[in-house]
Amino acid sequence: MSENERTDPAEAPPETSETTPEAGSSPEPAAATATADAPDAASEPAAPEKKTGEAGEADEKKDDDDGTKVGWVQENIEAVVVAIVLAVIIRHFAMEAFVIPTGSMAPTLKGLHVDADCPNCGYDFAVAFPEPDEDGIWRDFQGIGRDAIRVTAACQKEGCGHVEERTIQSNEFHNGVAHVDCTECGEKVKVDQADRERTNPRIATILRPDCICGFAFDLGVTPSEVRGGNKILVNKFVYKFRDPRRFEVMVFKNPADPAKTFIKRVIGLPGETMVLRDGDVYVRRTRTVDGGEGGVSEETFDEIVTKPRHVQEILLQPVYDMSSVEERKGRTPPWDTYDQSWNVEKVVEGKIPISEFTRLECDAVGPRESWVDYSREIDDFYAYNSRDDFGGGSSRHTVGDLRVTLDVTMNGPEGGVMVEIREDDRSYRLFLRGTGPDELAQTALLIDGRAKTGTQNEALKLEAKRSYRVVLENIDDRVRASVDGKRVLSVETFPWGYIVPNDPDKTTTRDSGVRLGVRGDGAVFENVTIQRDVYYTTNGISRDVFDIGPDEFVVLGDNSPNSQDSRKWSKPGVPRSYIVGRAFTVFWPIFDFKMIK
């Protein structure tokens, strides 16, 4: 289905309404009491005494039971009707449930997907699964019923010995023998009857996802392993009193097909000129500048849009996680060093053995600096997108907006540690000094090797043998640093939050990277993670400037490479009248319950 980001109304769960039925107050019959004078017994014979027999008592009791039953049934019917009416009113005016069928907002909101465990590093992540065709049939499930075989074989090439495991179909065996390619050395590995083990025969399809470690693997999927999309609740009431705000997640009718509902994040507001450049969002503005000799003129510039912190946390994507220990040998190691002061088993051609990546330790180096570099490219890769089915490798823009998080422990008081983010020719370096005497060392942020004015922090010093949690980020042209959760530095960077349109100095990022450095007594780096900002791609899109109407909103999906949104529509704006409401919570599956930010 081409419209890969619509939402479907979820079947509402049964409404339950506990109400206290209104008490049916039928008073007990009171005994009659004579109040008139008694007649003369001698002049008028006494009336015969009326006796109540057993039959009469039963009739009276039956009448009371019928009345109670009728009252109880009527009250419950009324309660159910009232509950249904209230549910309809709430659904129409206040709140409605929807299901997310696709991955255009992943990983914020997951559509139809399967869970994957990378066999290389153990990283857990969700992988998008193809949604059904218009007729509701999964074409990839046409293979149901064919036998699937789990193949296990060891590569016989000298020096390799890699054990290969893969799920293949039984019809791939020819004369009892099949071949698979070893992912380590590329050699053909023979698999015969003795090497194969039958697994679940209802493998429906085989996806080939890529992990953040760069390892691609086959993932056999059975129908029972396919997870449905997140179910969300939408507040249909809030936008009756105010406009949608930038970066809120909004449900709306598709402008091209109002019968379908989409879910996206609000990026551009009414009346703005919005610009997408190098993955970031800018808004075009004008200002008055001094033209000299008392004259003034207006200058047009594009101001970068900074995401609120709670939204930024959601939009960060994983690049590297040291806790996911990689096992495959011969792959490009994540860290490079040519310095023997780094304490590893051995340094071979400048590459640290992969087995040592649970920590990076550097011995004392004195006054000089010693560095390790993250060696892999950092781009807008989404592990959620299956490489074969969703073009996970087709976008691939270099991303310079990064966050580095790590734990660092200094071996002694002398010197300090450094964390650096590189974006093309620019470098943003955080230097954290130790407690020892060092006239040249001050905790500071250095941009292109020069301390940024006002960023020195002489009071902050790292004590030896104590672990500190350090975060450095360069996102939306702002650099921030924190130590143990406390902000220590925050500055705007070039181009100071805005650029002149078509400025040749602000081009697409061509290179980016991360470095860790040590000076003095040495240090240990652990639990290193690298994350990147969302990158709004314009791949195959002719439009990167959006002139938004006075009553319209521009919307984009979080999974930019796989989202049908304002970038691709002939009319990019969503009219106010098409807005359904604000998505505010994921209520199913229950273990994924969260507020949508």
Image (spheres, helix red, strand yellow):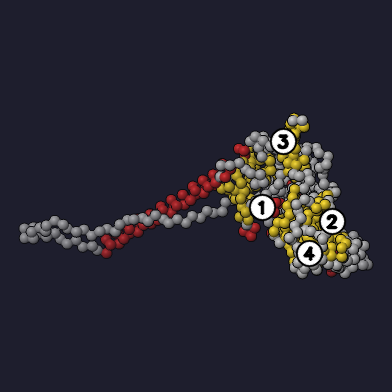
In the image shown, does 546 or 454 lie closer to the viewer? Answer: 454
Residue identifier under label 2? 376
Residue identifier under label 1? 310
Give the residue at x 21% y 62%: 51
**N-terminal label among 3 and 2:** 3
Q: In what quadrant of the picture does the N terminus appear?
A: top right
**N-terminal label among 1 and 4:** 1
**N-terminal label among 3 and 4:** 3
Q: CA distance from mark 1 to mark 2?
A: 28 Å
**N-terminal label among 2 and 4:** 2
Can residue 207 be spotted in the picture? no
Residue identifier under label 3? 287
Q: Contact, CB < 8 Å: mark 1 with mark 3?
A: no
Give the residue at x 62% y 58%: 590
Local SS, label 3: strand
Q: Give the x, y percent position of residue 298.
A: 73, 32
Local SS, label 2: loop
Q: Amino acid at mark 4?
A: Gly
Q: Comparing marks 1 and 3, which lies closer to the viewer?
A: 3
Q: Comparing marks 3 and 2, which lies closer to the viewer?
A: 3
Mark number displayed over residue 434: 4
Question: Can you tell which quarter of the image residue 186 is in?
Answer: bottom right
Label 3, residues with CA under 10 Å away: few <14, some 14-19, many ≥20: few
